[in-house]
Amino acid sequence: MLSKKIEENIFKALMITATLIVLLSSVFIIITILIKGLPAMNLDMITKTPKGGYYLGKSGGILNAIVGSLILTGGATLVSIFFSLPVALYANVYADKSSKIVAFSRVSLDVLWGVPSIVYGAFGFTIMLFFGLKASLLGGIITVALLIFPIMSRAMDEVIRMVPQELLNSSYALGATKFETALKVVVRQSLPGILSAVLIAFGRGIGDAASVIFTAGFSDRIPFSLFEPAATLPLAVFFQLGTPFPEVQERAYASALILTIIVFLVSIGSRILIRRYSKHVIK
């Protein structure tokens, strides 16, 4: 009895320690970004594109990177939803629960989830060379969509698996088809979790630099075409930190702060939507 109590206290202490490490690390990162980024933050940073000599310390902002990140990641998220949701619905509504194909698909997606983003960038770059595409917004969207597809698919899959089988059986008993059950019962029941999966994938995509450095390129202009190169916030941070000018390096932290704020606002918006649609969930 005493040994069990000691074991419980040890694991409790480990959990508290791990939680404190995560919280303190997050607080340290946020404080560092705020201290170094706020002095360089101004209206020009979010309302103007880089002017001549911006990376030498002259005037301008990163509006091109803000718009580019939102368009690129938003487009990639929409593309990923188009493929991820059918995959998750097929695995849980149409396919047999003991299907080897479904089991293999889940293992494959888990493996793809752990592949470094630079590998996706290299793969996307190879596809672009095959089709004769240059670094562009379209290339970035395709690559980021490939990057976040396994994340979104597995997250949706786990959420949909939690839908009680009794709900599906009740829908079938009332004469509904599998397609009607998937859309009107399963999706409605798991909608809060699906929104969370989309948020996780969006946050992963908007913060990645390695997958877009060769596929989306970089431009000081706002992209107005899918075939134009597009700047992103992670690359803007990378390039600004790489300069020897302290004022430009401070702008890199300001760019990181803007990226953090965008992710925070998306998180708040998703929480509002999740709370709104949670009323349809049968608990």
Image (cartoon, rainbow, N blue to C red):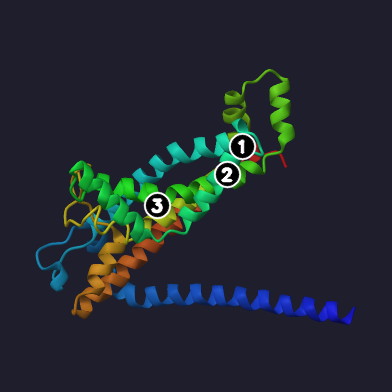
Q: Are marks 3 and 2 in contact (CB under 8 Å)?
A: no
Label 2 vs label 1: CA separation? 7 Å
| Disc number placed over residue 180 in the picture, else none | none
Q: Secondary structure at mark 3?
A: helix
Question: Pointer 2: what residue?
Answer: 157
Question: Pointer 1: what residue?
Answer: 92
Q: Are marks 2 and 1 in contact (CB under 8 Å)?
A: yes
Can residue 270 be seen at all in this image of the molecule? Answer: no
| Dot 3 alpha-carbon crowd within 10 angstroms: few under 14, some 14 to 19, many 20 or more | many
Question: Label 1 sits on what residue type?
Answer: Asn
Q: Which mark is first along the chain, 2 or 3? A: 3
- Whether residue 51 sits left or right of residue 114 in the image: it is left
Question: If the image is split into quadrants, where does the N terminus sit?
Answer: bottom right
Question: Label 2 sits on what residue type?
Answer: Asp
Q: Which mark is first along the chain, 1 or 2? A: 1
Question: Pointer 3: what residue?
Answer: 147
Label 1 vs label 3: CA separation? 23 Å
Residue at the (31%, 52%) spot, across then down: 123
Can residue 12 be seen at all in this image of the molecule? Answer: yes
Q: Farthest residue toward the top? A: 175
